[in-house]
Amino acid sequence: MDKNVSFHYDSELQTTAHFFNKYVEETLGFQLIKHSKPDRNSITFQYDETIENEEGYEILVDTSQIIIKAKTEKGAFYAFQTFRQLLPATVETNSVHLRNLYIKDAPRFTYRGMHLDVSRHLFSVAFIKKYIDLMAMLKMNTFHWHLTDDQGWRIEIKKYPELQNIAAYRDETLIGHYNDTPQQFDGKKYGGFYTQEEIKEIVQYASERHVTVIPEIEMPGHSQAAIAAYPNLGCTGTTVKVATKWGVFEDIYCPKEETFTFLEDVLDEVMPLFPAKYIHIGGDEAPKTRWKACEHCQELIKKEDLKDEHGLQSYFITRMEKYINSKGKQIIGWDEILEGGLAPNATVMSWRGTNGAVEAAKAGHNVIMTPTSHAYFDYYQSDNEDEPLAIGGYLPLEKVYYFDPIPKELSTEEATHVLGAQGNVWTEYITTPEQVEYMAFPRAIAMAEVNWSNPRQRDYQDFTYRLSHFHKRLDTLNVNYANHLYEIEGNVVTRNNQLVFDLQTIIRDKTIRFTTDGSSPNLQSEKYTPYLPIEGSTVLKAAVFDNKQKLGRDFELIFNKHAAVGATISLEPKPHKAYAGSGSKGLVNGVSGSNTRFGDKEWLGFWGKDVTITIEFDKPTKISSVSTRFYNANGQWIYAPKEIGISYINEEDGRTLHQVNQVTTADTTLVPHTFQIEEITTKHIEIFIPNYGTIQDGLQGAGNKAWTFLDEIIVK
Ligand code: ACM
Ligand code: ZN
């Protein structure tokens, strides 16, 4: 393909054809000249009515021509995106060679979304455009713009100037993690908003890329910023501040006429800015504390013959839905809008797992899948200790890639209500555009594939191989993606009665090199081949290399040989399934857990239960100490036990000995504990760990049982 090829397009596809030609000019340095009819060496955008899917397309490349067929500009646009990916990541000459090929392609789902929260942190118009460009490159077609929340109102509403003067700014912002004690604040005013002109510009920009923008105006909860500006919108009428930290707040809209007038006025300004069919009205996390104590709310419940405050939430949403429907639009709400009865025409966005989606789809409502388990890109994507601070959780790339948006509980008929899936980027802990990119990429690429391709074609190995090449495109586009492809997964396992290190990496055509002397591995270090026998306590360091350089980061596994390594261990009860680590064996594999994360495979978590651990040695073993560590992160409901007991049978006289120790907990995340034992010989140790008990009032998780987390049990 060079400047001598002739260019043709049918008028039905002319917008995309021009877009394409502009791209050719930007990358190859020349414009294609339009000829009246195709001849040799031509590129043609051909309108084809017979293509079934609105967004489908075909591409044919042979020795003399390139033909792109579509029924709509959308289909042609996606053909163009695929075409881009056929070109080299960086084009340095003014001619490129394409392979002969034929592609026939169409998406699986019609809703292919990415979300961005601009309330917790604000991002420039230029960055929003870049985000939209990246979405369009991935054939995503919906941008869910989270514009209002407790920490800031971000859309200009001319009728209510205090939204701009007050609701758009907070006095300061929490720094560090919410769970840090004490919480700390930066003391700096923060905020801003998008003017209606800027919004129009973004919506137009998105529309040229076939991306629909859905605005979210939260109600009745997550509205403290608006109530700060107009205190009468709340139940108490007292002044609150725009929130300066994260979480769920009790000051929510009071369902009085004044509030409905305000929200209708707001929507009257919002709706004309967004040609999309949908308006997202939030609906999530609305505590009912104020409504329970509010005379007006209680009277309304009686007057409308509602069951309770959930009924009142349903009344609120249904009333707003009616208003929005009357303007020819439909609502989307988070799955809490199911509580107390679903508004008749609502689409449900399922985030607290998939039960909400199942219930709504069975009731004949459309659903969009964004479960925290597979779609929350604000969660950690790696358990490396040096990941940037995030809200918590763990959602690695592979898990996103294998997400199936259709819940198993749905019949084929019910499954037609699943419109598609969306990656969510909440920004409490994401302060810069670079960090948005880091959290969103590459997980958004996996989500794009989830939404587009046939699940039978899903192959993570193949995906990561393609992704490793796609990195070059992301580099060219200046995207700060996270790269965890060249990381090593390491375990201590038993092969033929011998303890060995087992190292794995997802990219198969690369080499692992390692050291055992504590130094960082380099190109001269020994090559790893499965498996590496373990001789004794070892600091193993390894990394992935190609033949020129180290590709990833150093992996480190500290193996600490002690008397219980490889002993038989049993647990009563089993750990909670969300925190089962590598199972009971992980407590005696010679490897301790992370010092800063309890979600790795060495930590085991038990919820609200007393735990008994039994260790059996196959021959009498001399012991003088037994130690372990407890995790202590009270903000996440995790508490070290108050005491711990041990018993063991002295082989020499057959007597059972017991010892109970108080565990001294300080304000530290790690609480180590050691039993000193008068040197004896034993084949049997039992450790008893009573649960901490119920969490006190006034603390995170109050009234719930605490979690117990422990890692390696070291016997010397
Ligand atoms: C949500 O994450 N609160 C929808
Ligand atoms: Zn009220």
Image: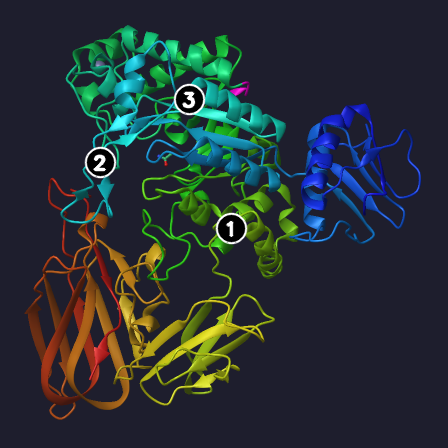
**Which residue is found at the position 21% from the left and 30% from the top?**
171
**Residue that mark 2 sits on:** 188
Quadrant of the displayed image that contains ligand 1: top left
Within 8 Å of ligand 1, the CB of disc 3?
no
Callout in the foreground (2, 3): 2
The image's mark for residue 342 is 3
In-front residue for pair 126/354: 126
* Magenta stretch, residue numbers: 275-280
Residue 308 tag number:
none
Tell me the residue that label 1 is attached to.
Answer: 442
Amino acid type at mark 3: Leu
Image quarter of the C terminus: bottom left
SS type, badge 1: loop
Residue 649 in the image: x percent, y percent?
Answer: 15, 83
Residue 147: percent from left, percent from top: 39, 27
N-terminal-most mark, 2 or 3: 2
Tell me if mark 1 has few (under 14), some (14-19) or many (20+) residues whose alpha carbon lies within 10 angstroms of its own.
many
